[in-house]
Image (tube, rainbow, N blue to C red):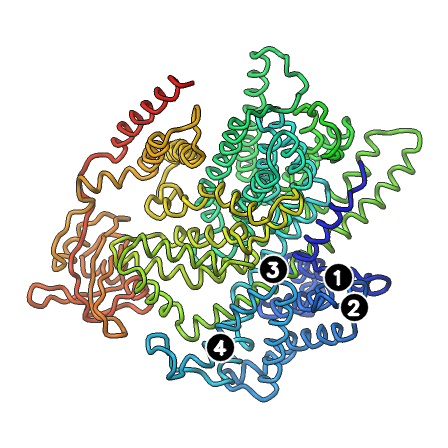
Amino acid sequence: MTSPPAAQVDLQQLVAATDTGGRQPLGWQAKALAGIALVWSLFQIYYASNIPFFLTDLTGWNVTLNSDSARSIHLSFAMVLAALSYPLTSRSPRQHVPLYDWALAALGVAACMYMVAFSDQIANRAGLPTTADLAMSTIGLVLLLLFAYRALGLPMVLVALFFLAYVFFGDQRWLPEVVQWKGASYGKAMWHFWMQTEGVFGIALGLSASMIFLFVLFGSLLEKAGAGNYFVQVSFALLGHLRGGPAKAAVLSSAMTGVISGSSIANTVTTGTFTIPLMKRVGFTSEKAGAVEVSSSVNGQLMPPVMGAAAFLMVEYVGVSYIDVIRHAVLPALISYIALLYIVHLEALKAGMTGLPKPGADRPLTTKALGFLGGFGGFGAVCAILYFGLDWAKSVFGGEVFWVVLAGFVAAYLALLALAASRPDLALDDPDAPIGALPETLPTAITGFYFLLPVVVLVWCLMIERFSPGLSAYWATVAMIAILVTQKPLKAAFRGGRSIGRSIAQAFRESFQDLIVGLIAGARNMTSIAIATAVAGIIVGTISLTGFHYVMGEFIEYLAGGSLMVMLLLVAVLSIVLGMGLPTTANYIVVSSLMAFVIVDVGAQNGLIVPLIAVHLFVFYFGIMADVTPPVGLASFAAAAVSGGDPLKTGFTAFFYSLRTVLLPFLFIFNTDLLLIDVGWLEGVFVFIVALIAMLLVAAATQGWFLVRSRLWESAALALVAFTLFRPGYWLDQWQAPFDTRPGARIEAAAEALPPGGDLRVVVKGEDFDGNMVERTVTFTFGDPGPGAERLMRDAGIAVRLENDQALVDDLAFQGPAEKAGIDFDWQVASIQTPADRWPKELFYLPALLLLGLVVLAQRARR
């Protein structure tokens, strides 16, 4: 293993400055900083485990923590590490922590722990803050913004200050009347933001404390165990021999690393230091090599199960299970990655590139095919055995299944580790060294199969046991700790040798050191995320206090002029702007809090009912694009630092490559099949195949190359075919109306006729809170059969009365579906809509495929 060059050291410092803090103190201060981070990780493991309940039962002392106390402690640790790790200015010392930062850290802890120490008194005077309450709230809020500036940069602080300014000055007469609100006193605002769970200590920080930390820690331990290097090496063994192989390997390794990484910048640098030089050596320019790495690394934030921690936030914001979030998000992410691989292939074709030499390249084609099919079939068989075998074990062994699974885990771990010990440990080669033959796939893969066991534990807990994401991550982390501590000693034992006792003892010391370093790194990686979720609570708190999202909705609706597509484009642009300079977690919180409501509301007014998960994924995708888009795109600057290319050109090229990612959110807004909503497994496979073909055609159209260089009409035809495959319903809607419309006065009869689980689509109109006439389309899902009036109130939360052949809203159930949809008293049920009996939309695939065949014939003639 060669020592890292100076440029790589600088890049490591860049990642540290962004993710863990640019200050690296010496002496006792370094030990103190590491000790605080270590204690934070241990506290989070303690909080996620059953140990507090066990100790409470054993001693009789209540040592359990409620959610509010855990959030305060969580933010206390984050504030301390932010004060000690992130210098205040560029001139602040890097080698030691100045006295004022220790003082700021102490004040931050005092402000956070104030709610824990005086929780009973605060609860008894709810809404009536004392002078001490206001002082601590002010100190805490000011310090939070200061630490946000240090850990996250100025953009996040400016966004938070804008919302704070709206709280205090939003009632001023010099503001346009449309954006004014009634205003709040200083005491009410401080109580809202700091002293209760509507602001800083809200849902986002709660998820950071209960779920996000453990997943980040799990990824950190997995990386420290060597999984990151393993993913890179396996990717090169699999794809390095193909045309443009290093770039394809970069995409695959970034996808695998992105699954465990919460930072697109760290992903870019971690894999990019190896992949970008190799891409350049096979013919990619500096900018294109950097752009490929940026596109694939940023896409890692879209890949389940972590999704830059946004997956856990969607659970709360959308109100669906974690498994559902993963199911909805996985198809677009996979399609986007495969399309990026195809873009890389097209770039390699344009430049006439070749792959790297691979051992066994002269083997017969039948041998290669059998090897591929055997590997693919073996992987499928293992997945089936794990899924059905674990499910079977649960049904057979009942309450003892934990010990059975534990024994199986240990046996599998020992077997896979013995297999790995039969091969030398992987070393990350110097990318600047002469290119030799690529490693063989199977010998490379077997050196790290055991890294998949903690992932199996995670999947088992989530899919079979149906544990919460936090508890599932806890058990996966426990499994990862066991592997990290034992892998080196057991390898030494399996390999034997004359000095085996000394080797095992040395391996134990190294493993324990790796564990400590992994726990410290996990906590330091969480610092900026925890601060970001706390600051994002200011935005969320402002929205809940002032209703600012309604103002934003009216503003965008005014600019869009009633056009749904213009509205979506405006939301997309604003999501990118709001996301510039923000980490993934804060990015999603901000854009979803402001923009999700706009899509739902304006869509309903235009007759488009969009599932909430589709809306949140839409704004999340465009928020993530801020990491790519110049002039802020931090991942593009990191890649340019590796490649030596121009940062802006790298960013624009990466954005061009990411057009497939930009297109997907628009498509799944109108075609929710892409999110596997109400789609079975067989239909899901069909949707995946069709959507994948369509996205590959989009890539070919934007790259101007299919079988050969495309002419303009051929690129346009490919884009048209792709659109038809993605959304065949558009053409069918032009030919046949999607719904049959009936008078709204028949709503009770329509509700009574619906079968259980049936949907009723209703168009309502009336006067909103501001006196404007609005029209909205909503869908109600009905349960058990019964009289129409009874089902309407029970399942839709609405009662109607008939006046002059019109159905008017007479009553609304509190927090029922109708009230949540924005329907008010005396609104008119204008019409009811039922799905029309019309042709299958898939018929339009036929002319699309004929047009595709025409393009293929035209290009084959030139080829």
Distance from disc 1 to disc 2, alpha carbons, whole Å, reads 8 Å
- Image quadrant holding the C terminus, namely top left
| Image disc number at residue 854 | none
Q: Tell me the mark number nearer the camera, choosing from 3 and 2.
A: 2
Eyeballing the image, is 483 above or below 245? below
Query: What amino acid is labelled 3 in the image?
Result: Ile
Left or right: residue 739 versus residue 115 is left
Pointer 2 residue? 97
Pointer 4 residue? 165
Which residue shows up at 56% across the image and 59% down it? Answer: 581
Query: What amino acid is labelled 4 in the image?
Result: Ala
Q: Earlier in the sequence, mark 4 or mark 1?
A: 1
Distance from disc 3 to disc 1, alpha carbons, whole Å, reads 18 Å
Q: Name which quarter of the figure residue 709 lies in.
A: top left
- Image quadrant holding the N terminus, namely top right
Q: Name which quarter of the figure residue 434 lies in.
A: top right
Q: Earlier in the sequence, mark 3 or mark 1?
A: 1
Q: Are marks 3 and 4 in contact (CB under 8 Å)?
A: no
Distance from disc 3 to disc 2, alpha carbons, whole Å, reads 22 Å
Q: Are marks 3 and 2 in contact (CB under 8 Å)?
A: no
Classify mark 4: helix, strand or loop: helix
